[in-house]
Amino acid sequence: MKYKAYMAHNFRTIPQLSALSEEEIRNIEIVGNVFPFKVNNYVVDELIDWDNYLNDPMFRLTFPQKEMLSDKDFETMKKALDDKVDKDTLKIIADSIRATLNPHPAGQMEMNVPEYDGEKLPGIQHKYEQTVLFFPSSGQTCHSYCTFCFRWAQFVGMDGLKFAMRETEQLVGYLGEHQEVTDLLFTGGDPMIMSFKVFKQYIEPFIDPNNKTNIQTIRLGTKVLGFWPYKFLTDRDAQEFLDLFKKITDSGLNLSIMAHFNHVNELKTPAVQEAIRLLREAGAQIRTQSPLIKNINDDPDVWAKMWRKQVNLGMIPYYMFVERDTGARHYFEVPLIKTWEIFQKAYQQVSGVCRTVRGPSMSCVPGKVQILGTDEISVNGKTEKVFVLQMIQGRNPDWVNRPFFAKYDPHARWMDDLKPAFGKKFFFDDELEEMIEEAKEELQSA
């Protein structure tokens, strides 16, 4: 299959849209002028059930829905389009809506960007001790865009809201100075949007036996298996990628494909199954992850089927995330208690080989906070219902794997909604506040 992309300016040419009413098509157009919209022919032709598109998870995953905007914002954008305002004015209106939607959550702009040789590295994030995230400038798009994507700001051209870095020289230098870093995660966007020629240049320094870093694992955060498995089947440089992956693993490095699968339907095609086989044959591990997303996969049976299918294909279920507090969160987010109940009901349906998955996990300011469940705890004769939590990862490694408690709140949807169950602060609050203040001071002095 030859790759073909549809975006806001040409999506009306998709043949299958004849199943939609003109109002539905117009709604996609209106919302697509606020949130990024891109879908390719593989998703359109092989993954979406057009006979039942209104309830189809892959349609909701890739085509913007009217309800993703508030009624007020929808009408504002609709009026701008109806009035045929010029391009610059349209962008100002769209940006004003975007600015209210927390485009960069979890302190990633303020707290995660490191320095090297006295210079900020805007294409790198170093939040957790052992892992560095790298945003190659050539990987700052995707084969298709997920409607829930927490990095949607990367794709809409808002000033100052994009992580990207072109050269690896500073990255290698930084990693050489930080021997505690063992894992390098290429992310974006999607690094697998890059051509082999470009991608190879980013990888070569780390498979050089003389490199001075302590990198032991290269991770590729990618949606390519779900949205374009032909990357490893029929694309012009497919075999070159597979050969390079084999070279990585032969060098002694672990290669982990951090594969984003949001629904079991993404695993049904012969193309994705063959691509998975070829990647495993090249020595790559494939670990799978996804947020729990209302209107797409908020069903324990879907998760249980997905985990089982992933294991049967030789992949490792890795994370269930809580949908982040950004973008159209009102449309996608699920209360924490329901999220945990879905996780538990799915988890109890599968065998131990699927129970490598961790979650539900919130990637928030202090770290990756896991919901372990609820309990009732008596203190000084008073019984209180609580959420039981722990950190899978933390800004301070000492925070990891320490149980703590939050007051039970059936309406809570994110860490910021939770209050300490005993006392006025969580155990990490004082240290986290110091980190935040230090980051503010550094920004002010920059």
Image: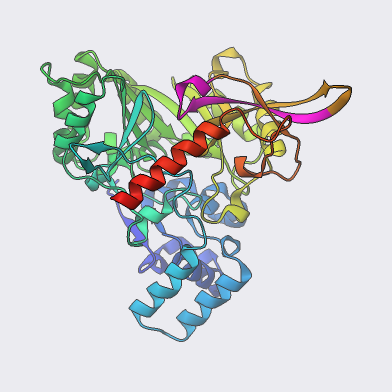
x and y percent of residue 303 in the render?
A: 60, 32
Nearer to us in this view, 180 or 320: 180
State how the image is colored: rainbow
Residue 197 location, quadrant: top left
Whether 254 is drawn above or below 437: the answer is above
Residue 202 location, quadrant:
top left
In the rendered image, is residue 320 in sight? no
Looking at the picture, tell me which residue is in the foreground, 131 or 41.
131
- Vertically, is 406 above or below 36? above
**x and y percent of residue 180 in the render?**
31, 20
| Residue at image location 27% in from the left, 49% down from the top | 2
Query: In this picture, which residue range is highlighted in magenta?
Result: 384-400
Name the outermost residue toward the right: 381
User: In the rendered image of this protein, does residue 16 appear above or below residue 333?
Assistant: below
Question: Does the segment drawn in magenta span residue 386?
Answer: yes
Residue 4: image x %, image y %?
31, 54
User: How far across and down, in percent of the image, does residue 281 sit?
Assistant: 30, 19
Q: Who is closer to the viewer here, 328 or 237? A: 328
Q: Main secondary structure of the magenta part?
A: strand
Q: Name the residue rendered at 82%, 29% in the picture.
A: 384
Q: Residue at x 47, y 63 (%)?
A: 98
Query: Can residue 171 be seen by looking at this rendering?
Result: yes
In the image: residue 254, left or right of residue 62: left
Depth order, front residue of 104/219:
104
Can you say which quadrant of the picture contains the N terminus? top left
**Residue 141 inside the magenta-drawn segment:** no
